[in-house]
Amino acid sequence: MATAASRKSVMTLFCSPTCAYSHRTRIVLHEKGISADIEYVDMSDPPEDLVELNPYGTMPTLVDRDLVLYDSRIIMEYLDERFPHPPLHPMDPVSRARARLLAHRVEHDWYSLLEEIENAPEGRSQKARKQLRESLIAAAPIFAAKPYFLSDEFCLVDCSLAPLLWRLPMLGIDLPRQAEPIKAYATRLFERHSFQASLSEEEREFAAPAHVTPEDA
């Protein structure tokens, strides 16, 4: 399908300036130092040719000459494989499969709750907020095990977790003292150049890491 978007000679990432799925793909772009155009899209009024390219009308959408991808995890893995340095996935098949399983669990267990908080009616949203907070607190020892998420090296799983953790204050989720390993981990991610470069203007307005509430002090 020859459209204005697919004829671009430069790789282009069409994305929302606020959604976590778009955010994590931008982190990969900057972590890899990939030259690409980043075009922010108003989801209430997307460009016509982009609607033709992506039948689901979702963000992010990556256009690389004749290739069009519109699932954030597929986009992230494609970028990692096409631009292999620095690698964001383990090289051996067993470790790579484990990393993919971790990414799946992050999406299934935590991103699903993020979506519910953002989109569900207030009652369900409040329940999802409580579930996400409790689930993260229960996982605090995992965040303490390694410098990154069950890894000595920054990887695609961290690219997914960073946008989620950055949004906690905006979601109304405060972490208690026993979640200190999560806050330390989040700080390591937020200080990376790739994370800072990935932020849209709207995302820069989100609060920094979640703080300790008085009752938890």
Image (cartoon, rainbow, N blue to C red):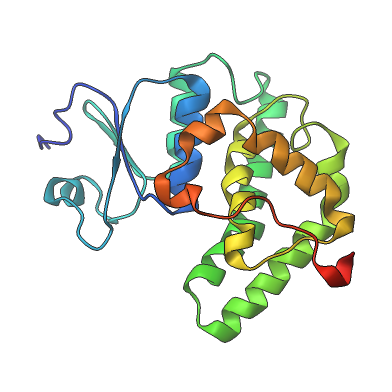
As drawn, the residue found furthest toward the bottom would be: 123
Height in image: 131 above or below 199? below
Image-based side of 104 in relation to 32, left or right: right
- Image coordinates of residue 32 in percent, x first then y, are 49, 21
Residue depicted at x 57% and y 16%: 86
Tell me residue 212's x, y (percent): 80, 60
From the viewer's perspective, is residue 167 above or below residue 68? below
The residue depicted at 17 percent of the width and 27 percent of the height is 8
Residue at the image point whose x is 88% and y is 47% from the top: 141
In the rendering, at what x and y percent does residue 185 appear? Answer: 76, 40
Q: Is residue 25 above or below residue 55?
A: above
Of 160 and 189, the residue lying toward us: 189
Q: State how many labels appear.
A: 0
- Estimate the x, y position of residue 76 in percent, counting from the top left: 48, 34
Q: Is residue 118 left or right of residue 154?
A: left
Q: Name the foreground residue: 26 vs 5.
A: 26
Q: Is residue 73 visible?
A: no
Q: Quadrant of the N terminus?
A: top left
> Is residue 18 left or right of 176 when viewed as pictured?
left
In the image, 11: left or right of 135?
left
Which of the 4 quarters of the picture holds residue 98?
top right
Q: Residue at point 54% right, 70% down?
A: 116
Quadrant of the image containing the C terminus: bottom right
Q: Residue furthest top?
A: 85
Q: Find residue 94 and report its image quarter.
A: top right
Residue 15 visible to the viewer: yes
